[in-house]
Image (cartoon, rainbow, N blue to C red):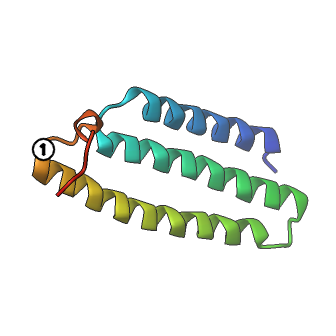
Amino acid sequence: MIPLENFLLLSAALFAIGFYGVLARRSAILILMSVELMLAAVSINLVAFAAYLDPEGLTGMIFAIFVITIAAAEVGLALGIVLRLYRERQTANVDAADELKW
């Protein structure tokens, strides 16, 4: 069996890369991708801890599916906002979104 520490290191690395992407990028699409990377890291943590604490249970997988569902809804809403921003400003740069009036 793979030790829990390996999953935690993988999850920490993914979360750190996603966090850096959110802070360093200006494109809204790249920021969304970084947020999705962070949510994937959280899902790995949930499944790893659930498998470590209760190998017979499915609690971690259920929570991971819930996180994936919420992430899909978040991406759908955020992409709608990004498309609206692009139509108004002809850029997906988040600095151009200082005001989002019609």
Residue lying furthest top in this view?
Answer: 24
* Among the 4 quarters of the image, the one containing residue 23: top left
Which element type, helix, strand or loop, lies under badge 1?
helix
Residue at point 86%, 72% (across, down):
56
34 horizontally vs 49: left or right: left
* Quadrant assignment for the C terminus: bottom left
How many residues crowd around disc 1 within 10 Å: few (fewer than 14), some, or many (20 or more)? few
Residue tagged 1:
89
40 horizontally vs 89: left or right: right
Whether residue 3 appears in this view of the structure is no
Residue at point 21%, 42% (across, down):
92
* Among the 4 quarters of the image, the one containing residue 34: top left
Q: Amino acid at mark 1?
A: Arg
Q: Nearer the viewer, residue 23 or 13?
A: 23
Residue at point 61%, 70% (across, down):
66
Q: Position of residue 71 (x, y in %)?
A: 49, 61
Q: Nearer the viewer, residue 85 or 17?
A: 85
Residue at point 64%, 56% (across, down):
43
Whether residue 43 appears in this view of the structure is yes
Residue lying furthest right in this view?
Answer: 53
Q: Total marks drawn?
A: 1
Q: Position of residue 59 (x, y in %)?
A: 77, 71
Q: Nearer the viewer, residue 81 or 43?
A: 81
Q: Position of residue 14 (x, y in %)?
A: 57, 38
76 horizontally vs 98: left or right: right
